Amino acid sequence: MRKGVKIIISFLIIVIVAVILLPNIIWEKYFTIGNIREEIEVGKESIISEEIVDKPKGIDKYTIDNLNLREGPSIDYKKILTIPVGEKVLVIGHKDGWDEIIYKDEEGFVSANYLTESEKEAALTLANYLAINRDPEETVETMKVVKDILLVNKTYGLPSDYNPGENPEAVDQLKEMFKAAKVEIGKEMMSVSGFRSYDHQKRIYEKYVKRDGLEKASTYSARPGHSEHQTGLAFDIGGKDSKYWVNDSFANTEEAEWLKDNAHRFGFILRYPKDKSHITGYKYEPWHFRYIGVDHATKIYESGLTLEEYLL
C-alpha cells in the first residue's frame, strides 16, 4: 500500500514539473529562436538596403566632342573606342579629372572636360559639328526667328538675296553706347565692321579656307549665308588703336571690359563669349556684338547664357 502511494506521488510530481517547465521549453524553442531568426533576417535586409543606398546610380551626361574611351584615367591607358559628339553616356565615378562611364555596354574612362549634363548644350554642339561638313553654297528657304529674334549660326542661315543693310535702330543704339563709353571711361569706340552681303562674306570665307583649311577657318569665319553680319544687326567694335581691331588682344583692353559689362544696357550682347565655342560654333570674339534689344540683352547678360541657349 505504501509502495503504491509512493508511486502515485512520484508520478504526480513528474506531471507537475512537466506542466511547469514544458511551456518554457516550448516557448524558448519555437518563439525565442524564431525571434532570433527574425532579427537575423531584418539585419540582412538592413545590410542589403545599405548596399543599395551606397551603390552609385550614375548620372547621364553628353559628349561635346569626339571623345576617346580608355581603360584607365589617363591618356597612357589603351583606347577602347571613340565616342562621337552628342552621345549620351552614364557616369558612374570620377578620378583625377576623368569620369568613369558606361557607353553601349563598354566601361572605361573619359576626360570630364568634354562632358556636359545639358542635353540642349550637346545638341547645339552636334549641330555645329555637322555644319562644318555642309556644302558652303547651301542656303535656307526659311529664316529662324524665335522670340522675335533672328537667329543666324552654323545651323540656321539667310538666303543669298537677303540684303537689309545696317539696321537703323541698332545703329542708333550703337551710337548711344559709344557716347556712354566716352563719358564713363573716357574711351572712344567705333564700328570696325558692320553689314556684309552674302557675296562679301563668301569672298572672306573662301580666303580663310584657302589659307587655314576648312576646319580651322570654320572656328572663326562663317560660311556665306550664315554670318551674323548679313543680318545688319552685328558689329565688330574697336577702340582708337587699330592694332587691337578684330584681335584676341582686344580682350585685355579697357574698352572690351566696359563693353562686356555694359553693352546690354543698349540692347547688345557679346555674341561669342569665352568657353562657349562648342555651343556658338565660334571661338571667343571679344569684339563681336549683336543687337537684340535691351530686354532680351539684359536677360542674357544676367543669366550668362549664349543666344542659342536663350532661344532654343
Image (cartoon, helix red, strand yellow):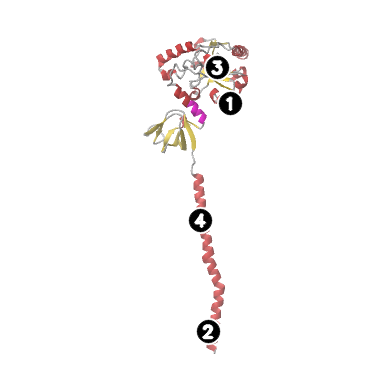
* Precedes in sequence: disc 4 or disc 2: 2
Q: CA distance from mark 4 to mark 1?
A: 53 Å
Q: CA distance from mark 4 to mark 2?
A: 49 Å
Label 1 SS: helix
Q: Is residue 100 above or below residue 151?
A: below
Query: Which stretch did the figure color magenta?
Result: 119-125
Looking at the image, which residue is at 58% across and 26% down? 303
Q: Residue 237: percent from the left, percent from the top?
A: 54, 13
Q: Disc 4 marks which residue?
A: 41
On residue 303, the disc is 1
Label 2 SS: helix
Q: Disc 3 marks which residue?
A: 289
Q: Disc 2 marks which residue?
A: 7
Whether residue 10 can be seen here:
yes
Q: CA distance from mark 3 to mark 1?
A: 17 Å
Q: Locate the N terminus by quadrant.
A: bottom right
Q: Residue 5: percent from the left, percent from the top?
A: 55, 86
Q: Locate the C terminus by quadrant.
A: top right
Left or right: where does residue 132 sit relative to residue 152?
left
Location of residue 301 by image quarter: top right
* Precedes in sequence: disc 3 or disc 4: 4
Label 4 SS: helix
